[in-house]
Amino acid sequence: MIHTIRFRLTVLYSGLLFVLAALVLGGIYYAVSKTTDQRQISVQYAKQYGENGQYVGKREVVFAEEVENAVNVQTMATLRDYSLYTLAGLYAASLGIGWVLSGRVLRPVRSITRTTEDIQATDLKRRINLSGPRDELKDLADTIDKMLDRLEEAFRAQRQLIDDASHELRSPLTIIRANVDAVLADPDASDEERARAVAIVDRATTRMTKLVEDLLASARRQGGAFADADLDLAGVVGEACEEYAAPAAARGLTIVRDLGRGLEMTGDADALRRSVANLLSNAVRLSPPGGTIRVGAGRSDGWLWTAVRDDGPGIEEADQERVFDRFWRGENSRRDRHTGLGLAIVRQIVESHGGRVAVFSRLGEGATFVLWLPPRDGVPGTPPEGNPLA
């Protein structure tokens, strides 16, 4: 018990109170002793005679000064004794009062300790919710509650990611095992059957590789590990367009660029390039052969923006709110076994830079994805709502 804060506070407060009381009483005793005569009592004698005048002995002679001196000596002795008794009683009382008061002061700390001990990594729903005045302990409890909110959200996202990833990986693994067991491990399988099985396994492994890459990218974006630096948004978008020029040409698609100037901002160039590349990947994949992909970048109401517009099948209005969710896939993505992580990664990157994503689409008329990003000097308010490529 001697190592507890409550015990140390009790001893500290009681010791300080004892020393203060001892100084006060000692000062009073010293002042009284200096202003009071306390010399030793002297006894004087006088001859004593009987009725016949004969000497019969001697008697004590007491003067008024001697009586006063005796009273002073007794008073100082009494003051000393009562001072010592008072100090002893005060120290004992201060120990009890200090123990009670320190317990009341540290009661919020015990509440915080008990609650945090009950909280486990598998159940982060409990909160301290400390009541009382707005003091340092209340601030500490509120800070811990906010930390628990972030931890709960992180664990929830982690569990969701693991569940979704295990679900998505189960299908290609089942395909690979089925083909290996049924065809590749069968010595009687024909070359045509083996070639078809190899092609299926290759597609499944390619999909798994893409899924793992997207999962790693998603985890890095959630961790907020950005290498921020000054950059030109138009240059980043232009580099992403160059990377997808060949895949677009292979499908007979044309990428039309309309990039403004002076689009300076602070951020992670590689992450932003990947976000634009994900939009271009979807546009190249979904646009019909011979179509056009329009890419733009500029400034509107103080915000920077970049947008990608395709001639694909479009997105239903009811699905536009879900298109940026992790592992969500539309009908076209389901048919080509897309991972469903690309747009989720785009949103994570943009929101981590303080921006916002938006989609504008109608069925049969393609889709426009817009990324709103803050400039280097920052902007007040919220990003505009309109479509800059409209």
Image: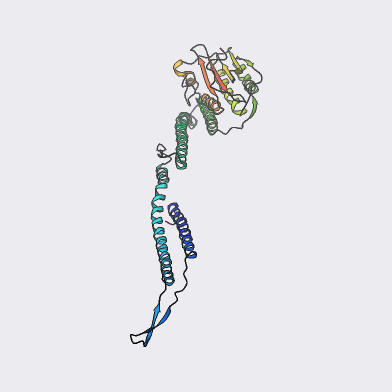
Left or right: where 177 falls relative to 239: left
Q: Residue at x 45, y 18 (%)?
A: 319
Q: Position of residue 347 (x, y in %)?
A: 53, 25
Q: Is residue 317 visible?
A: yes
- Using the image, determine if residue 311 lies above or below residue 102: above
Left or right: where 308 falls relative to 151: right
Q: Is residue 177 visible?
A: no
- Which residue extends farthest front? 52
Q: Position of residue 10 (x, y in %)?
A: 43, 54
- Using the image, determine if residue 29 lies above or below residue 202: below
Q: Which color mode does the image show?
A: rainbow
Image quadrant of residue 66?
bottom left
Considering the image in quadrants, where does the N terminus appear?
bottom left
Q: Position of residue 11 (x, y in %)?
A: 44, 56
Q: 174 or 335, which lies in front?
A: 335
- Which residue extends farthest left? 51
Image quadrant of residue 236?
top right
Q: Position of residue 383 (x, y in %)?
A: 54, 20
Q: 237 or 264, which lies in front?
A: 264
